[in-house]
Image: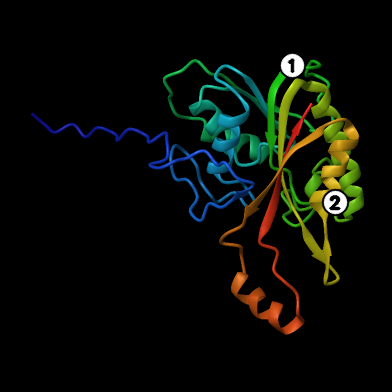
Amino acid sequence: MGVINKKPSLKLHPDEFALECTTVWAFPRRGNWATHKSDWRGNWAPEVVRNLILRYSKEGDILLDPMIGGGTTAIEAKILNRNIICSDVNDEALKRTKISLDFKVDNKSWQKIVKRDARNLSKANDESIDFILTHPPYADIIKYSDGKLVDDLSNIHDIDKFADEIEKVANELFRVLKKNKYCAILIGDTRRNKMYQPMAYKVMNRFLKAGFQLKEDIIKQQYNCKATGFWAKKSQESNFLLIMHEHLFIFQK
């Protein structure tokens, strides 16, 4: 009889995992379980998403990621038995998310992938979502559509204008989220003309203006930033510090 080569089963969980319990998170190595990949620029670490889902939702809840990007949130929601609505304005992101969800799990969770602008979720009912988590673009630091997609927030260079558009997102997220439930946003800062630009706090203020309360401000350390070696030298020559952290805001309605 011939030897039958069985396809190895997909590992669905990290080898080691502990729920974070402080306001500083650091993950030197990105998760490599399930279908996670790190080739979508700017996507967040699976460890961040897993921590958020486990802490701020329960099995069977309906989650929303309105800027799904590379699909990290969708993968973790499926594994952890949460239902999720995944939306984006970028067709490539939606295609990537669909591909990333092509694996089996032993639960009845569902995943819905739709093309929507996070500033207009009119098809979603008021107070219909149990938990929102997303990693929006940081203005135009990484452009996801090369300026061709009008609705793409990553095409906005002016930080105050970007914050204006994020306020529209915040208003919609506040509307669709259930009372007392949580909304998590990971956002970073940048520099313009050698001066520090507190983009994250501008975004935070727009969420507060929308009606949210700030539950937590978590500092997430960044690793493996592109061109770090080059910029380390520039930092010394021009006397500025490299930005190596992001803010993970947890808001409550």
Q: Is residue 25 above or below residue 110?
A: below
Mark 2 lies on residue = 156
Q: Quadrant of the C terminus?
A: top right
Mark 1 lies on residue = 128
Side (left or right) of 97 relative to 252: left
- Secondary structure at badge 1 equals loop
The scheme the figure's colours follow is rainbow
Side (left or right) of 198 relative to 8: right
Q: Give the residue at x 52% y 30%.
A: 101
The three-letter amino acid code for the residue at tag 2 is Ile
Q: Give the residue at x 69% y 81%.
A: 236
Q: Which percent across, then down, holds residue 102?
A: 48, 30
Give the mark, 2 or 1, whose residue is nearer the N terminus: 1
Q: Is residue 214 above or below residue 62?
A: below
Looking at the image, the residue that sits furthest to the bottom is: 237
Q: Quadrant of the N terminus?
A: top left
The three-letter amino acid code for the residue at tag 1 is Ser
Q: Is residue 71 above or below residue 123?
A: below
Q: Give the residue at x 83% y 21%.
A: 122
